[in-house]
Amino acid sequence: VLKRMCMSKTNTPPVSLSQLSVQLRGKNEEQIAVIVGNVLNDPRLLDVPAMKVCALKFSDVARTRIVKAGGEAITFDELARRRPTGKNTVLLRGKRFARETCKHFGAPGIPGSHAKPYIRSKGRKFERARGRRASRGFKV
């Protein structure tokens, strides 16, 4: 946990309530999910299961939904008092490569690459000429 706390912001991605419920499905009710990052609400999740969650930050709606479902939203100092050895806890993390910038990684324009180019607009005149479309004589 200490190693994760020292990580940069890009390496501590947020976790949604729906992702938490998927990860904790079938797990012991006594287990505490530990997230070094934010826990955010997901309006697509209709009923939140009762779960114990420890995180750096909770959004207001996420905290109220967890507590209303019969779960607990605790902080790290509370976790240290309850489980000093870290037994019966699950360390979770959100998707690190879900950021918009990660879509641009790689070389756009190379056949087979799905990297998103940095362009001004998605119109007719922008990166749609020869060298892109088969109808304009582009051969791989």
Image: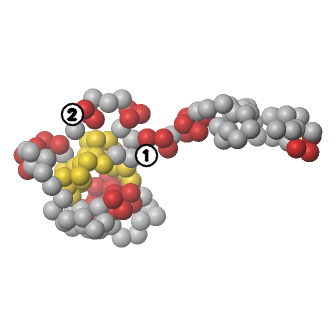
Q: CA–CA distance between discs 2 and 1?
A: 19 Å
* Image coloring type: secondary structure
- Relative to residue 56, is residue 10 drawn left or right? right
Pick the front one: 71 or 107: 107
Residue, x 9% and y 49% (percent of image)? 83
Disc ID at residue 2: 2
- Relative to residue 47, is residue 3 drawn left or right? left
For the residues labelled 2 and 1, say whether their Cβ atoms are less than 8 Å apart: no
- Image vertical order of residue 55 relative to residue 23, above or below: above
Q: Earlier in the sequence, mark 2 or mark 1?
A: 2
Question: How crowded is the residue under tag 2: few (<14 C-alpha within 10 Å), some, or many (20+)?
Answer: few
Residue, x 37% and y 49% (percent of image)? 15
Residue, x 44% and y 61% (percent of image)? 43
Question: How crowded is the residue under tag 1: few (<14 C-alpha within 10 Å), some, or many (20+)?
Answer: few
Residue, x 20% and y 65% (percent of image)? 28
Please, what is the three-letter code of the amino acid marked with disc 2? Leu
Please, what is the three-letter code of the amino acid marked with disc 1? Lys
Instruction: Report the residue marked by disc 1.
Output: 95
Pick the front one: 34 or 67: 34
- The answer to whether residue 65 is visible is no
Q: Quadrant of residue 110?
A: top right
Q: Secondary structure at mark 2?
A: helix
